[in-house]
């Protein structure tokens, strides 16, 4: 608890309260356990990757790099050294090298006249299908790197690769079925005296940035639709989770014209401003935090023409009503809060449970969490080490803050909140209130907060006050209880889950958000729309020469060519 003080509460200044709270929070320290480590006694030790990222991939070529480079390490400890396992090196671009990448993309775009944007959609599809074949050749290497660098377990790492290729196939299938994506006017047809045909055209140069947690899937959910539409790209390699992209350079070089895709690695604060300040970026594909997104937009000299597609932060809430099926609610909330250690924007990051069932809910949730296997990613573990070096200390702060303000660590007796090197055992916090940081902040890790409510108005107030606009989950069997919540949430979040955890799949379903959670919608078709512009070719329907000409354009024009 907070340190005692002789001054009456009414005389304590706000700054003093803040100081006392911070000091109390610091009194909590995660119990420590031996770190997750691997040595030469394990067959996986011989499979640890060593990815050489000391090169530039600009203009379709691997070029030598002579600047600074950093070691890339795994959160898994090497028994031989007692330190994080070294698994690669990553080039650290300076401002000049970053600008060279966007210049190469701009040259390949050539104000829309480059080889790639002028290519027919059918030929671009064929190139991307060849890319998938090339990527398939290094599937096992990619899966191995995902396990080592970001500690995604073997099943999830394989699923990430496969889901990505399935997504690509689905996007291509939808374009072949209807290149207008339901806009209409696939062929010339008359409307209001005008003959019209519509296709989707590219925007220009795209800057793509995605986080560590789904480095392949989330980046490619933007990148591939962007490429299919004829845009050129600069891909910012994340500092954590970036090695997997380096493995793909040769695959891209083999199938795409020079400069269509270019890599930039190094500190974002050094490389991104000079890229944006050139004004060469026409569209941003971004998945990450709101602060970085705001800065990128402000750095562009002409933000009025910058198109933005962004999937941002989420503080998704699970609302458990008195009549909920407890087994379902507990299982779905456990999966929603702990899958991949809770390191998902779609994770359930706050639960509000009715007083009448809260005790039993917390007990059962604690039991489910205790069943999760913790350990190395290739051992079938559900809880694995956290790849971000500073994350365990941040989670420790959140737990300490909550405990100092009256919450309880409900699974302390089962090891909750313990730290095994970079592995953070899920901490189940009960009695969370809006005064606690964990109620408001996106933890992006295995700290699981449960708040209790007695009247549904408390839930409405929390949702209304939240910055979150991504998702909510409702657990109830009562249609009359669900309906008012759906009506309220329908103007506050982009997805409402009934008796199931929050999530993004299936990819055919729109993944949208409001407030500080999204700008744009991600799905098989919506991502294509986000990186393209509807372009209409029209003529006066009564003009016979134009009508005759339109009949031959599908054969003569690459833009209007059928698939």
Image (cartoon, rainbow, N blue to C red):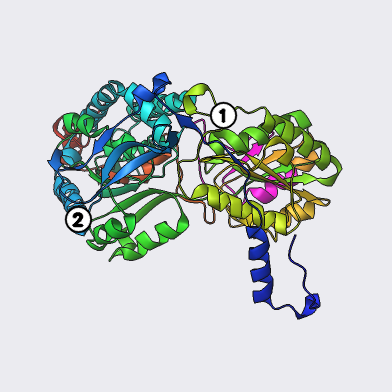
Residue nearer the viewer, 348 or 110: 348
**What is the CA distance from the residue labelled 2 to the residue labelled 1?**
41 Å
Residues at badges 2 and 1 in contact (C-beta under 8 Å)?
no
x and y percentages locating residue 502 in the rendered image: 60, 38
Image: magenta residue range: 483-512
**Magenta span main SS:** loop
Q: Is 503 contained in the magenta span?
A: yes
Q: Sort mark 1 into few (<14), some (14-19) or many (20+) by Cα contacts within 10 Å.
A: many
x and y percentages locating residue 315 in the rendered image: 59, 49
Q: Residue at x 29, y 57 (%)?
A: 272
What label does residue 99 carry, if any?
2
Q: Sort mark 2 into few (<14), some (14-19) or many (20+) by Cα contacts within 10 Å.
A: many
Q: Is residue 255 left or right of residue 470?
A: left
- Residue 50, compared with residue 314, is above or below; it is above
Q: Is 107 contained in the magenta span?
A: no
Residue nearer the viewer, 466 or 236: 236
- Residue 148, compared with residue 350, is above or below; it is above
Q: Is residue 128 visible?
A: yes
Residue nearer the viewer, 247 or 424: 424
Q: Which residue is mark 1?
A: 382
Q: Is residue 544 visible?
A: no
* Secondary structure state at the residue bearing disc 1: loop
Q: Is residue 346 left or right of residue 474?
A: left
């Amino acid at each position: 608890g907070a340190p005692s003080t002789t001054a009456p509460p009414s005389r304590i200044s706000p700054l003093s309260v803040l100081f006392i709270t911070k000091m109390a929070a610091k009194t909590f320290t995660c119990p420590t356990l031996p770190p997750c480590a691997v040595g030469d006694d394990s067959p996986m030790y011989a499979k640890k990757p060593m990815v050489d990222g000391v090169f530039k991939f600009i203009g379709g070529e691997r070029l030598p790099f002579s600047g600074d480079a950093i070691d890339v390490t795994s959160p898994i400890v090497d028994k031989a050294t007692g330190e994080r396992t070294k698994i690669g090196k990553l080039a650290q671009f300076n401002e000049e090298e970053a600008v060279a990448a966007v210049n190469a993309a701009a040259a390949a775009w050539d104000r829309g006249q480059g080889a790639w944007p002028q290519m027919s959609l059918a030929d671009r599809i064929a190139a991307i299908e060849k890319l998938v074949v090339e990527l398939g050749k290094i599937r096992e290497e990619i899966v191995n790197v995902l396990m080592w660098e970001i500690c995604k377990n073997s099943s999830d790492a394989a699923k990430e690769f496969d889901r990505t290729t399935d997504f690509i196939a689905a996007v291509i299938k939808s374009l072949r079925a209807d290149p207008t994506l339901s806009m209409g006017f696939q062929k010339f047809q008359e409307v209001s005296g005008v003959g019209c045909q519509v296709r989707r055209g590219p925007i220009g140069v795209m800057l793509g940035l995605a986080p560590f947690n789904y480095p392949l899937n989330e980046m490619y959910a933007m990148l591939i639709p962007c490429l299919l539409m004829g845009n050129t790209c600069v891909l910012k390699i994340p500092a954590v989770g970036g090695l997997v992209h380096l493995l793909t350079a040769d695959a891209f070089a083999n199938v795409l014209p020079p400069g269509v895709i270019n890599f930039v690695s190094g500190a974002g604060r050094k490389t991104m401003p000079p890229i944006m300040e050139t004004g060469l970026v026409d569209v941003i594909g971004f998945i990450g935090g709101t602060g970085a997104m705001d800065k990128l937009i402000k750095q562009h000299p002409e933000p009025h023409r910058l198109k933005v597609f962004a999937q941002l932060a989420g503080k998704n809430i699970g609302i458990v009503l008195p009549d909920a099926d407890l087994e379902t609610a507990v299982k779905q909330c456990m999966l929603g809060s702990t899958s991949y250690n809770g390191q998902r924007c779609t994770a359930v990051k706050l639960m509000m449970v009715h007083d009448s069932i809260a005790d039993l809910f917390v007990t059962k949730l604690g039991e489910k969490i205790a069943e999760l296997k913790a350990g190395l990613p290739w051992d079938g573990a559900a809880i694995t080490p956290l790849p971000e070096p500073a994350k365990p200390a941040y989670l420790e702060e959140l737990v300490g803050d909550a405990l100092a303000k009256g919450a309880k660590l409900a699974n302390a007796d089962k090891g909750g909140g313990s730290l095994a090197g970079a592995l953070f055992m899920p901490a189940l916090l009960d009695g969370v209130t809006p005064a606690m940081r964990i109620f408001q902040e996106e933890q992006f890790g295995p700290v699981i907060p449960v708040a209790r409510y007695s009247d549904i108005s408390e839930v409405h107030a929390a949702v209304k006050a939240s910055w979150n606009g991504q998702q909510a989950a409702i657990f109830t069997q009562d249609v009359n209880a669900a309906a008012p919540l759906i009506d309220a949430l329908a103007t506050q979040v982009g997805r409402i889950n009934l008796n199931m955890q929050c999530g993004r799949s299936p990819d055919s379903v729109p993944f949208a958000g409001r407030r500080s959670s999204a700008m744009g919608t991600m799905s098989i078709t919506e991502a294509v729309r986000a990186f393209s512009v509807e372009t209409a070719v029209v003529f006066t329907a009564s003009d016979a020469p134009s009508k005759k000409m339109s009949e031959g354009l599908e054969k003569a024009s690459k833009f209007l060519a059928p698939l």
